[in-house]
Amino acid sequence: MLTSLALIFLVGLAMAAICQRLKLPRIIGMLITGIVLGPYILDLLDPSILSISAELRQMALIIILLKAGLSLNLADLKKVGRPAVMMSCVPASCEILAFFLFAPHILGVTRMEAAVMGAVLAAVSPAVVVPRMVQLMETKYGTEKSVPQLIMAGASCDDIFVIVLFSTFVSMAQGGSAHLLDFVNIPVSILLGIVLGAVTGYILSLFFETAYAHEHCVRNSMKVIIVLGVAFLLMAVETWLKGMVPISGLLAVVSMACVIKIRTVSSVAKRLSEKFGKLWLAAEVILFVLVGAAVDIRYTFQAGAAAVLMIGIALVFRSLGVTLCLLGTPLNRKERIFCMIAYLPKATVQAAIGSVPLAMGLSCGQIVLSVAVLAILITAPIGALGMDFSYKRLLQKEDV
């Protein structure tokens, strides 16, 4: 296992650096590393690593969501209002609808399998989007109209919305039927997740304050470990209550991070966010390399043109969804185009849940994973390069 971890980190980081020099997203290099080192080409990774890859991917997702929650300014989110709420669900819903309508004809899957595929593919990537939006806020591009705040808030909630839908659709696919209660559980799960996370965040912040008042200062590094441990527990609560009470563990994690940010001194919240950013450096290597390792590249190439066509159609529907969300806002045409570009890249969620249908034994598992990887390879560079090269032309720099 140690040899496998060494290969994952060293080769993954080297390939990421090469891609970065080529102005491509680092995750492309990591995915390629996983594909090459994985069981379908060189077979250099220990099976024990691959057997726990689902848990490792979930840990990586928790880390990036904690960072997003600690970076999110709720005052800016409140200022943005309706469009941010709509951006968290409308574009994803439009993309899922595209898969539901067209995937059965293009990829030969059933309607239920198309819904599962759409839920996997519909999420925008916080790994690609969030760091860029944070950078835009720091450099004051688009901040006058809260464009980066809108995108970051929408993208963070978009992932939760899609993951909740995914779990619902997967349950339906396993059971072979859809029930009204499955859809009623979605808002219940979201609401309970927010409440659980907010209460937990309040208790944690109270604990840190009390410790400080009694001259038992908790170091920021220790706070990171405590927050991370509690986040894992919140995810476990979702599993413990499954079948009894629907609750979104991931949304609880984001909600907890937001409350900690609100109740903590801004400099401390910033330091915590930075430390989670450093954790993400290691987590993203493991996440994307292991996703690449799970991909049978031969099957991915067989999906080929049909999968690319389906991804293209879905992105058109997604862009239409973004357009609908921005109707009636003060954003001009250039800023709306930037929002569309920012909502294109896929990576983190597809990496985290793309292989779940295959692991659960669903007949659509291999095609879902293949399309997910193709979507990452296509949209991550387009979205990342699109944002990097267009923000100075499409967004206005705020005068300070």
Image (spheres, grey):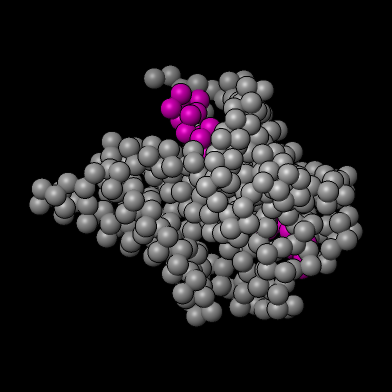
Visible residue check, residue 91:
no
Q: Quadrant of residue 195?
A: bottom left
User: In the picture provided, is 59 more to the left or to the right than 207?
Assistant: right
Magenta residue span: 112-141
Inspect the magenta stretch and tell me whether residue 17 lies in it.
no
Residue 26 in the image: state x and y as whole percent.
Answer: 61, 33
46, above or below 12, in the image: below
Q: Residue furthest left?
A: 214
- Residue appearing at x 58%, y 46% in the figure: 4
In-front residue for pair 398/358: 358
User: In the picture provided, is 154 more to the left or to the right than 258?
Assistant: right
Residue 15 in the image: state x and y as whole percent.
Answer: 63, 31
Residue 269 in the image: state x and y as whole percent.
Answer: 32, 41
- Residue appearing at x 50%, y 45% in the figure: 283
- Residue appearing at x 63%, y 57% in the figure: 47
283, above or below 54, in the image: above
**Dominant secondary structure of the magenta stretch?**
helix
In-front residue for pair 382/9: 9
Tell me how many marks there are.
0
User: In the picture provided, is 116 more to the left or to the right than 287?
Assistant: right
329, above or below 177, in the image: above
Q: Quadrant of the C terminus?
A: top left
Residue 310 in the image: state x and y as whole percent.
Answer: 82, 49
User: In the picture provided, is 195 more to the left or to the right than 302?
Assistant: left
